[in-house]
Amino acid sequence: MGECIWREMGLATEEYGRIVGILGREPNLVELGMFAVMWSEHCSYKNSRAVLGLLPTTGSRVIQGPGENAGVVDIGDGLAVVFKIESHNHPSAVEPYQGAATGVGGIIRDIFTMGARPVALLDALRFGPLSDARSRHLFTQVVAGIAGYGNSIGIPTVGGEVATHESFKESPLVNVMCVGVAPASCIKKAAARGAGNPVMVVGARTGRDGMHGATFASAELSPEAMARRSAVQVGDPFMEKLLLEACLEVYGLGDDVVIGIQDMGAAGLTCSSCEMASRGEVGMDIDVAKVPRREEGMNPYEVMLSESQERMLVAVKAGSEPEVERVFRKWGLEATVVGHVTDDGVLRIRDGDAVVAEVPAKALTDMAPCYMREACEPGYFRREKERDLSGVPEPEDYSDALMRVLASPRIASKEWVYSQYDHQVGTNTVVLPGRGTSVVRVPGTNKGLALTCDANSLYCYLDPWAGAAHAVAEAARNLAAAGAEPVGITDCLNFGSPEKPEVFWQFKQAVEGMAEACRVLDIPVTGGNVSFYNESSKEGAAAVAVYPTPVVGMVGLIEDLSQVTTPGFKREGDVVAVLGHTRDEIGASEYLATVHGIDGGPVPGVDLRAERCVIEITLAIIRAGLLSSCHDLSEGGLGAALSEACVLGGIGARVRFPGMMRADRYLFSESGGRMLVSFHPSVTSEVQGMARRHGVPVTVLGEVGGARLVIDVNDDASGRGEAHPGCGMVDVPVSELTRVYRGAIRWALEQ
């Protein structure tokens, strides 16, 4: 077989040699295509597996960790939460609507494949600057795709995050997270067992869409790759809704009816068949001639590699086929026996009487190559870490500086995005998007799930260890601010090419930082996704990698929904205070970027022990019923948090900073391990006493009230040797804060 064929499929020469060694012969075209997709980075994690082992994956609540379609965590009362996040970056760069839509469809299938009913979606998105026409097009179409699929299937999209930067101009990031709930005793696995048990294809018919989608997602976005629209799948949310309901009904036929089930996502029938056989330590015999098709003339190669959506492969108990077929027919779907489980460990593909592929199942999975790539610290790292920011001038107009930070796409309200999502379908959304950390009710209970996605791409570029640790800590603070105990993490690690030493160094550092944060905060990682090769190149130019973006999707448990806390100020006269230490840390901040045009500097320090203390005291104070509001402090610092608390509460505040550092450095510091809280004056001593016992300082700043946000400093705190006048260093009507905060993204998209 010509060398160009396997190279075109993304295989290296040594990998082809390894395949020949495993088979003891040269592979035929069908076999080569199967190896190419299964040994791609997207399916095999060949460039990341060795590093991912650093992540802590076990805990007292963990029912299922990495290795299945989704992670599963016990939430008590016989229930479990099932959750996963994945990327659909490359398809969204080529066909943004369908790329995003099928990303939603794929992650939903991962959840109900496990036996859970999906209850919520979240997304984490990155685009180029909104001043760029193509970036605006990608942004609007991706959001439309997420809305079109999620709204149609009836699962609320309740939260997420959006940011922009030049590095994402050609290679956007589209990460989608889905969360479901199931009886803990009814979790389904993707393992086939029992020689002779039938294997069925259920759901939609197979077409030619999505051919080699897995290998397409495992290469940089060159002009040639951008032209490969055939690698992008086409989704049908109405078909998926039928498939969801049919699968959940089939699970109810009895615990022994469905032996194993796997979504046909990346690599389609190839992936589902070999992974189910490999996990079950069995083989599988598949006749592609029996696979229902929607296109004429499809050959075995196309059937095995098609990534047509809304399909499942199911191994069922022998004799139960009529019952399974009856349920799927009821929902207007096909369920067709296409093969059976064998005991020889071989994945054997037939086309009628002819054997067209014969490969050990584990050769496609466990025997995939695993690389530890060369890692090299980038030259900019030390330079930015030691960058001197002492010469950054104080703003002449603090109100203007605050408004500019508030208008940054990273900080501004994402109302333009979430207003397109049906975030209340199902009637279990407790805290709506834009009003704080998303919270959904666990159906049939008074428990809640708090959900968040967090990452700071600039932090992770400047210092990937610290940036990834900050992402974990910020996600945990977000959940704690809502009154939730963090119980599990799913991650989506978005990087450039691992074959570049600087990129692999970023990846390795980020995983190490995330692992350490998870260990100290005692939050297990139950699964996730690695997305490499997020790079783009124009003709004649070197490929440019995106800023490293390890997205942390985190789930928290609220035992009693009456204790949900939100960030908006609630009551005239409440005390406004900060829990935790504020340090002079404006490096890598939104303030530095938006006001001074500096995208760099040292990332704020990471104190994971302090983070844990702040999370613990926050939960303790909320459970004691003492807080009116709680808002974690992160991007934009105290200035952004105060503004959001005023906007979300529809009420102003007057605060005065202590004389500890220059005013802009206090107002816009992005030190971690802090919360902005408000409470009734009568409980001040109780809050302070509880915090003191946890070793967490409480800094009282002022009080809630009025129709303006007024920020002043003590006489000796301005850094200019003068007191600010009584009108305040910042003095802005809440109505103006609201106008800018809610309108900034819409204005940017309308230009």
Image (spheres, grey):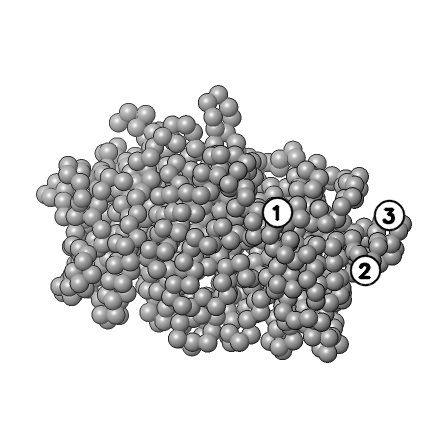
Estimate how packed mark 1 is, as few (under 14), some (14 to 19) or many (20 or more) residues with alpha carbons within 10 Å: many
Earlier in the chain: of badge 2 and badge 1, it is 1
Q: Which residue is mark 3?
A: 720
Q: Are the residues tagged 2 and 3 within 8 Å (C-beta)? A: no
Left or right: where 416 falls relative to 690: left
At x 38%, y 43%, the residue is 97
Left or right: where 644 falls relative to 552: right
Q: Is residue 317 above or below residue 462?
A: below
Earlier in the chain: of badge 2 and badge 3, it is 2
Q: Which residue is mark 1?
A: 407
Q: Amino acid at mark 2?
A: Pro
Q: Which residue is mark 2?
A: 658
x and y percentages locating residue 354 in the rendered image = 12, 40
x and y percentages locating residue 370 in the rendered image = 43, 42
Foreground: 684 or 293? 684
- Label 1 and label 3: CA atoms lie apart by 27 Å
Estimate how packed mark 2 is, as few (under 14), some (14 to 19) or many (20 or more) residues with alpha carbons within 10 Å: some
Task: Describe the element under mark 2 as helix, strand or loop.
Answer: loop
Q: Nearer the viewer, mark 2 or mark 1?
A: 1
At x 39%, y 75%, the residue is 444
Quarter of the image with the N terminus in it: top left
Q: Amino acid at mark 3?
A: Arg
Q: Quadrant of residue 421?
A: bottom left
Earlier in the chain: of badge 1 and badge 3, it is 1
Task: Describe the element under mark 1 as helix, strand or loop.
Answer: loop
